[in-house]
Image (cartoon, rainbow, N blue to C red):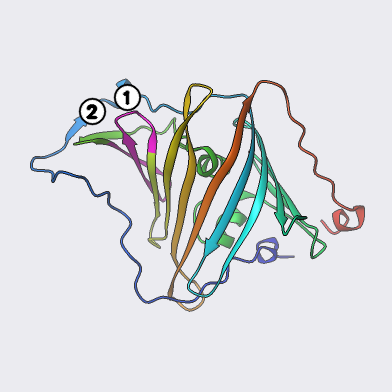
């Protein structure tokens, strides 16, 4: 069974023009060559915690359709992410992400799927792994051990990295918080952009309560360009030291198929 086919990418209508998202506009124009900074002395202010619990509203939009739902999120930092999807007050699906695998139980349709991240990346036409998914929820820099080239430009720092065929651009504000992350996959030029907003104090930590996720890709089927835009808004976030549970129960008859 081709497991990646069990995950349906969000249905989009082809659009002929994709807006450029691979640059950041600054208030003042750059009038001189940007200065490179020693990345060993540059530290991004990531969010430090043991466990996280959040109530989140998610909406996505394509030229063809739009939908919205609520997520209950539980997380153990750098280890496991659990999500319960609710629509119209009814739990319709559960997902759990670990370092090496993503598992989904679609209660509404009675389907269970488990995928490694290579298959998940193929299904959504962009590089995905645990650290990237954790980043889109909390705004931490996903590639920390990767040697960076740091450029100082006016009111932000630009950290450039490369991970395999993926070029990574981290846009860091003066407060050392990740404001924008751009992943560009070669040679397809597919792009995943994360913009983090609504930074508010949470346990004396600046936390982004909103994020805008934009996926631009060229279809392998018809060679046309598609775009999906996802808005994430946390209505409540708790950073905890007390361990959380991550319940994930799937009917035995569905597990036997894998």
* Residue position for label 1: 42
Per the rendered image, the range of residues in magenta is: 157-178
Left or right: 8, with 210 as reference point:
right
* Residue position for label 2: 37
Does residue 164 belong to the magenta stretch?
A: yes
What residue is rendered at 45% in x and 76% in y? 14
Residue 35, picture quadrant = top left
What residue is rendered at 79% in x and 63% in y? 108
Q: Earlier in the sequence, mark 2 or mark 1?
A: 2
Residue 167 x, y percent position in the rendering: 37, 48
Front residue of 12/148: it is 12
**Distance between the alpha carbons at the discs numbered 2 and 1:** 8 Å
Q: Are marks 2 and 1 in contact (CB under 8 Å)?
A: yes
Q: Main secondary structure of the magenta part?
A: strand
Element marked by disc 1:
loop
Residue 30 x, y percent position in the rendering: 13, 43
What residue is rendered at 33% in x and 65% in y? 19
Front residue of 81/70: it is 70
| Label drawn at residue 15 | none
* Residue 86 visible from this viewpoint: yes
For residue 188, above or below residue 37: below
* Residue 128 visible from this viewpoint: no
Residue 182 x, y percent position in the rendering: 38, 49
Residue 197, picture quadrant = top left
Left or right: 155, with 144 as reference point:
left
Residue at the far right in the pictured view:
253
Q: Quadrant of the C terminus?
A: bottom right
Residue 121 x, y percent position in the rendering: 55, 55
Does residue 177 belong to the magenta stretch?
A: yes
């Amino acid at each position: 069974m081709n497991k990646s086919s069990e995950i349906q990418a969000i249905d989009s209508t082809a659009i002929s023009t994709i807006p450029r998202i691979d640059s950041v506009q600054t208030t003042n124009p750059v009038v001189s060559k940007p200065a490179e900074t020693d990345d060993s002395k540059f530290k991004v202010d990531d969010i430090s915690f043991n466990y996280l619990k959040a109530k989140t509203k998610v909406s996505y939009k394509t030229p063809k359709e739009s939908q919205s739902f609520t997520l209950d999120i539980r997380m153990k930092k750098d280890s496991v992410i659990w999500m319960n999807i609710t629509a119209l007050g009814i739990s319709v699906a559960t997902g759990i992400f670990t370092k090496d695998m993503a598992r989904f139980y679609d209660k509404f349709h009675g389907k269970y799927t488990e995928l490694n991240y290579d298959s998940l990346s193929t299904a959504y036409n962009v590089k995905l792994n645990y650290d990237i998914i954790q980043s889109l929820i909390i705004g931490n820099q996903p590639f920390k051990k990767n040697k960076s080239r740091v450029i100082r430009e006016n009111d932000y720092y630009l950290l450039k990295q490369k991970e395999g065929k993926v070029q990574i651009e981290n846009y860091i504000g003066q407060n050392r918080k990740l404001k924008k992350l751009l992943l560009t996959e070669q040679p397809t030029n597919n792009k995943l952009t994360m913009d983090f907003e609504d930074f508010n104090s949470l346990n004396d930590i600046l936390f982004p309560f909103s994020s805008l996720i934009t996926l631009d890709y060229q279809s392998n089927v018809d060679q046309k360009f598609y775009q999906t835009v996802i808005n994430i808004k946390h209505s409540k976030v708790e950073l905890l030291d007390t361990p959380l549970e991550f319940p994930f129960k799937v009917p035995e008859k569905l597990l036997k198929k894998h």
